[in-house]
Image (spheres, rainbow, N blue to C red):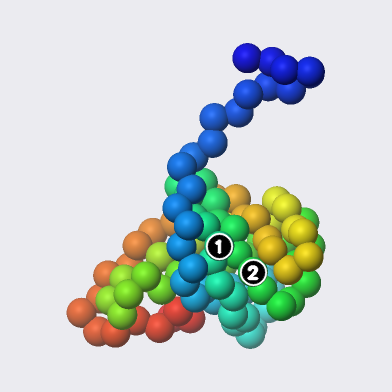
């Protein structure tokens, strides 16, 4: 359905989760910290203190529990103040019998 020149876009369901994450900019060595605002099957919205530019490639680790981490790679598609929307290119869940750390 088009409205005033815009198409209706079906979006993935967003889950409002406020949990810690770490991210690494492509080509860098130091992991940075942030906190999720929401997560969907196609992206993550998170807050961080570091300024990130549009199209920056990130490796991201989201610690869901002491034994479950999501590892993903994506690119920044929107930046507004300290909030960043990242489109996920691919992801995997890492389950461990040992406690996980976000920057494994």
Q: Quadrant of the C terminus?
A: bottom left
**Where is 19 relative to 38, above or below?**
below
What residue is pinned by disc 2?
47
Q: Residues within 10 Å of mark 2 (few under 14, many from 20)?
A: many
Q: Secondary structure at mark 1?
A: strand
Give residue 93's quadrant in the image.
bottom left
Q: Point out which mark residue 12 bears.
A: none
Visible residue check, residue 22: yes
- For image coordinates 20% across by 79% down, the residue present is 97
What residue is pinned by disc 1?
37
Q: Position of residue 13 (x, y in %)?
A: 46, 42
Visible residue check, residue 73: no
Q: Nearer the viewer, residue 37 or 33?
A: 37
Q: Position of residue 1 (x, y in %)?
A: 63, 14
Looking at the image, residue 68 sits to the left or right of residue 18; the answer is left
Give residue 52's quadrant in the image.
bottom right
Q: Position of residue 95 (x, y in %)?
A: 27, 70
**Where is 29 relative to 64, above or below?**
below
**Where is 41 relative to 100, above or below?**
above
- Counting residues from the start of the chain, the first of labels 1 and 2 encountered is 1
- For image coordinates 75% across by 58% down, the residue present is 79
Q: Position of residue 53 (x, y in %)?
A: 79, 62
């Amino acid at each position: 359905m088009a409205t005033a020149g815009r198409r209706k876009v079906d979006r993935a369901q967003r889950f409002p989760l406020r949990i810690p994450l770490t991210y690494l900019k492509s080509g860098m060595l130091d992991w940075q910290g942030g906190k999720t605002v929401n997560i969907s099957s196609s992206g993550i919205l998170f807050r961080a203190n570091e300024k990130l530019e549009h199209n920056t490639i990130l490796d991201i680790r989201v610690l869901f529990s002491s034994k479950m981490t999501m590892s993903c790679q994506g690119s920044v598609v929107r930046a507004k103040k300290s909030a960043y929307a990242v489109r996920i290119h691919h992801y995997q869940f890492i389950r461990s019998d040992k406690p996980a750390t976000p920057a494994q």
